[in-house]
Amino acid sequence: MLVNAIQIFWMLAVIIFVDIATDNGGRNAILQDMAHWLVLIILGVIGITLLLVVLPYVMTTYELTDKGVTLNRGVLRRQHLHVTYARIQTVQHLQWFFLKPLGLEKVQIETAARGSGHGEVVLTLVHASVGTEIERRQQAARAAAPGAQTTPVAGMDSDTDIATDNATVASTTYRLPNEDLLIFGITSLGFIPLIFLLLAVWSRVSEWIPGVEDWLANLLMHLPAISIVVLLVVIIGLGVMTEFVRILIRYWGFTLDFDGRRLQSRKGLLQTNTVTATAKRIQAVRYKQNIIRQWLSVGTAQVILASNVASKEDDKDMVIYPLVHQDHVWEQLTRYVSWLPDRIPAVTPVMTGYWALIRNALILPVIAVIPCIIWLRPWGWLSLLLLVWGGLQGRYAATRRGYVTAGRFIYLQTGRWFERELLVSPRDRVQSLTVRQSWWMVRTGLAHVQVSLRRGDGEYEVDLRYVPLAVGEAIYQWYLGDNVVDVATTAP
């Protein structure tokens, strides 16, 4: 919290400086008549910082006992939290570059406790040896626990071979090659939100510099079409380069270590992020590909854990391979997940509900387009592109659905936001499976299938929408254990 406050105040200082520097009236008023108010504001900000950030940090203490970690926190209301080493599921180390010379870092401990944020212990600005010592004591506590070698994972059937520990998997180390990191950054679609952010910044600039909007409109009206196209390409290129730099900083030096029981990933240039998790807490494996990476036959492999990985980890799931070829991903994932099959059966596509998904994807764009056309003309006509965007999103989601069950495994393929996802999970790790119909879907004979998995403090849900009711019932029977063959061969 202390480090985040420093970052926030730094950004606020920059924004205030830019705002004052670009506003002549505001600059003159501050320099001539409001200097004392500026001083009072600065003192107020410092006082609030001391009250809300520094004081809670000073009043927070911790102790490493023989049995666990004890955290004492609170200013007006003191809280004492004790977590035993055996209950610790994941340990995360966060270290900014300016803290490395001081040997300080932030340590975040996650347990198996459910509820919003319950069971989480955060040690802010402690020595790096503290997190290492906690991990060492956690391993010792697990090794000394009775039945540590044979205890099944919670939520697993004890009579299945899936419940066996991952100790039989050989230890290995993976480092992301630099060329894969470059491809991973260039093929990210994160530049799309950045372009919308640039448009929002532009609206602010038009307020800072009066007349710039009219000047730009007049300029565009007199520019040839090819120049406008070049301008759009430059804007998109700027967004792509910004996202590329963000990915490069975040995944720099990505390394994954596995000792047969624990997974430890390490990455980051400005902030080193180290996450340690127990392999037997893996609930499912998923492979994601955006539309660009599908063309290149590459994607990202992640595992869904029964304990939180980190608040800033991708989708709260642990990344195993940032970039891996789709023909080799499942074979390579068996190095870390002993129960995972090394070959994936062909997924049966879902052909029903095509127009329903396109209709659903167009609802929000239509709501946004109507006021833009009415009140923001002539620029509001550009909002019609949202209809094209929504239609393409709906078509993509409709054509990327698929399913198959083979033995005790279920394979679900879905698509959204131009990203295809294939999830693999054993039946024993599925928390619930729901087949539901609306009154309209009863007439069409379609249904939605929802699979829920445990994911940290909450659930991870996968929806297979608008499938034939017979398919939904067959998947439900598989979940009950009555069907151990491929659903695709038994359902129409």
Image (tube, rainbow, N blue to C red):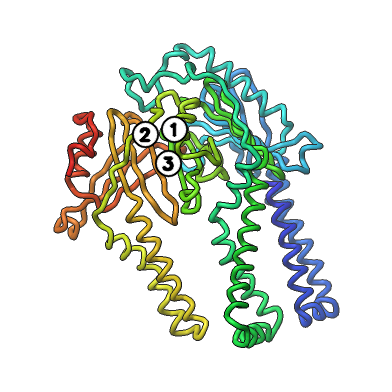
Label 2 residue SS? loop
Q: Is residue 263 above or below residue 318?
A: above
**Separation of disc 1 and disc 2 at Cα?**
7 Å
Amino acid type at circle 1 is Trp
For mark 2, what is the residue?
344
Amino acid type at circle 3 is Gly
Q: Which residue in the rendered view is the most extreme toward the right? A: 32
Q: Give the crowd class for mark 1: few <14, some 14-19, many >=20 residues within 10 Å.
A: many
The label number, if any, that marks residue 458 in the structure image: 3
Between marks 2 and 3 in the image, the one whose residue lies nearer the viewer? 2
The structure residue drawn at horizontal position 26% and vertical position 50%, both measured from the top left corner, is 448
Label 1 residue SS? helix
In the displayed structure image, the side of residue 147 where residue 322 appears, left or right: right
For mark 1, what is the residue?
330
Between marks 3 and 1 in the image, the one whose residue lies nearer the viewer? 1
The label number, if any, that marks residue 63 in the structure image: none
